[in-house]
Image (tube, grey):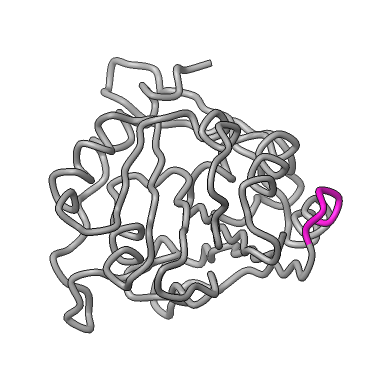
Amino acid sequence: MTDTATAWNTYSSQRPARRPVNAAGATTWFNWTQYTDHGPDAGLLGLRPGDRVLDLGCGKGGNAAHLAAQGMTAVGVDISPVQLRAAEERWGDTPDLQLRRADAVAYLREGGEPFAAVYSVYGVVWFSDPSVTLPAIRERLRPGGVLAFSQRPPVEGCYGCQASYIPRGEDEDPLVVKRWDYEPAGWERLLKEHGYSDVQAWVLDAPPGKRKVGTLIVQARA
């Protein structure tokens, strides 16, 4: 299996930087989906100014920077130094934004002050074993805190641990990482088994005129 940091370093080099402004002219914004200017906003997290929030697999930092700009203390964790370097270059001067290079589960198990919300946008929750990750997240959430995450919906009939491929050059084999795919009902069952409540999971349709692949969004409370 591909080294995790190597895989996400490679992925980072293929992804464009976030636009300077969105369609509304904002310099920071929150995006749950793979489509620009589409889907719900950070309201899914139920945060108030001053709350602590954790981004698992923060990538280039745009979502975490938006929450910090809105008055939260945002911690972004990623295992890829390339991703974090891009985040530091663009958002490093943002007050109340902390960026950490770490394995997500190891970071969660460090303990410390609890978070009001933990989220993952096409990130750690998708690419880690839920039997390990979900309990570790719950331990770091304050009572009533929110876990929310988004990812691609599963291919029908392909559930549980799957192989995900990150392309490289023409003469190189793709890198392989694991991901965990479930239908909404499957995520609801897993979260309840691990002690979460108020679980909701749904597939948000792609915007008109785009490809038909929607976004699976899940929200629950500790």
In this picture, is 15 found above or below 70?
Answer: above
**x and y percentages locating residue 47 in the rendered image:** 49, 72
The furthest residue to the bottom:
24
The secondary structure that most of the magenta stretch takes on is loop
State left or right for residue 131 relative to residue 118: right
Name which residue lies at 53% across and 34% down: 164
Quadrant for the C terminus, please: bottom right
Q: Quadrant of residue 183?
A: bottom right
Q: Quadrant of residue 72?
A: bottom left
Residue 81 or residue 182, whichever sits in front: 81
State left or right for residue 191 relative to residue 120: right
Magenta-drawn segment: 192-196
Name which residue lies at 59% across and 37% down: 179
Residue 69 or residue 132, whichever sits in front: 69
**x and y percentages locating residue 30 in the rendered image:** 36, 68
**x and y percentages locating residue 89 in the rendered image:** 13, 45
* Marker count (numbered): 0
The furthest residue to the front:
113
**x and y percentages locating residue 220 in the rendered image:** 69, 64
Residue 67 is one of the magenta-drawn residues: no
